Amino acid sequence: MESQIIEIDVADWQVANSNPARIAGLEAGKVLYFPHLPFALLPEERGLLRPDIRDPKVRNISLDAAGHLKGASGDTATQLALALMIGRFRSHAQSLVHSLLPKYKDALRLAPTSFRPTQVETRAQSWRADDRRLHVDAFPSRPNYGERILRVFSNVNPDGVPRVWRIGEPFETVAKKFLPRAKPYISWQASLMKTLHITKSCRSEYDHLMLQLHDGMKGDMSYQESADQITMPFAAGSVWVCFSDQASHAVMSGQYMLEQTLHLAPEQQYDPQSSPQAILARLVGHPLV
Ligand code: SIN
Ligand code: FE
């Protein structure tokens, strides 16, 4: 398998010049890896790196686009310090993406920024929620009609512990494997799920198929083991960027990560034809949204 990782050795969150090969790689579903791009914590922020800073009822601590902090435990001073740290990471992530991908700058829609203080290995989950299995991101309750999920990840582990991912095969290969097993899209069921508030809006055929790929991959243990894949330890002090709705990924171990999600309409890509929506539409032979 061709390498799914493009390494970029810059040490500044403002990348000096944009580079067409990197952009094409990212839009082909590869992961851009910046091994030497630490998000430096302020001395007073180091105390925020503890797992019990998260409210046990939620999965991650997050700062939403409006600046509201969710999912943290602790007093007002702690919550303020967390919001400032996560907000500072948000600015860094935005300047990285804007300098790397200038065409996206005015087209991106800001989604929440998360802080993930939990040790991955200790998380117990249902198979569907288990991100230790290879998958492409697709959300059961929030249909997105083909809107892209671009994510910036930063390993802020203070003890040099890497965040270990597995990275699987290209999206089209995954789609060709799992589309034949996908349940058909039934539009009245999509409206029923909206009426019952199972979904926030009506699932499109695109959303249905993306979930079928997500569940198909996670539910197939022999695929998990035998699919073409690499194990990738993202170093402490590194950053990586990918379209997580396209890059097949799984997280195996690690602790303390910051993550920024940005949404993008596929028409705003450098090459809209490389989007999952375009690939799936070509494979099934009709438009999906
Ligand atoms: C995921 O998006 O599947 C999880 C990534 C991570 O927590 O490292
Ligand atoms: Fe994921």
Image (spheres, helix red, strand yellow):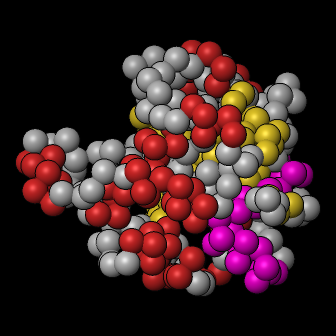
Near-viewer residue (186 or 128): 186
| Residue 99 is at least partly visible in this image | no
The x, y position of residue 272, in whole percent, is: 52, 82
- 166 horizontally vs 186: left or right: right
- 218 horizontally vs 70: left or right: right
Residue 31 painted magenta: yes
Residue 177 painted magenta: no
Residue at position x 62%, y 16% from top? Answer: 122
Residue at position x 51%, y 60% from top? Answer: 175
Residue at position x 33%, y 78% from top? Answer: 286
Q: Which residues are magenta?
A: 17-42
- 87 horizontally vs 239: left or right: left
- Please tell me whether residue 162 is drawn above or below residue 172 in the rendered image: above
Which quadrant, please, contains the N terminus? bottom right
- 156 horizontally vs 141: left or right: right
The x, y position of residue 126, in whole percent, is: 44, 23
Residue at position x 72%, y 58% from top? Answer: 31
In which image quadrant can residue 226 be found?
Answer: top right
The x, y position of residue 102, in whole percent, is: 65, 81
In which image quadrant can residue 51 be found?
Answer: top right
The x, y position of residue 24, in whole percent, is: 70, 78
Near-viewer residue (69 or 171): 171
Number of labels in the image equals 0
Near-viewer residue (46 or 251): 251
| Residue 114 is at least partly visible in this image | yes
Near-viewer residue (190 or 154): 190
- Please tell me whether residue 136 is drawn above or below residue 280 in the rendered image: above
In which image quadrant can residue 274 be found?
Answer: bottom right
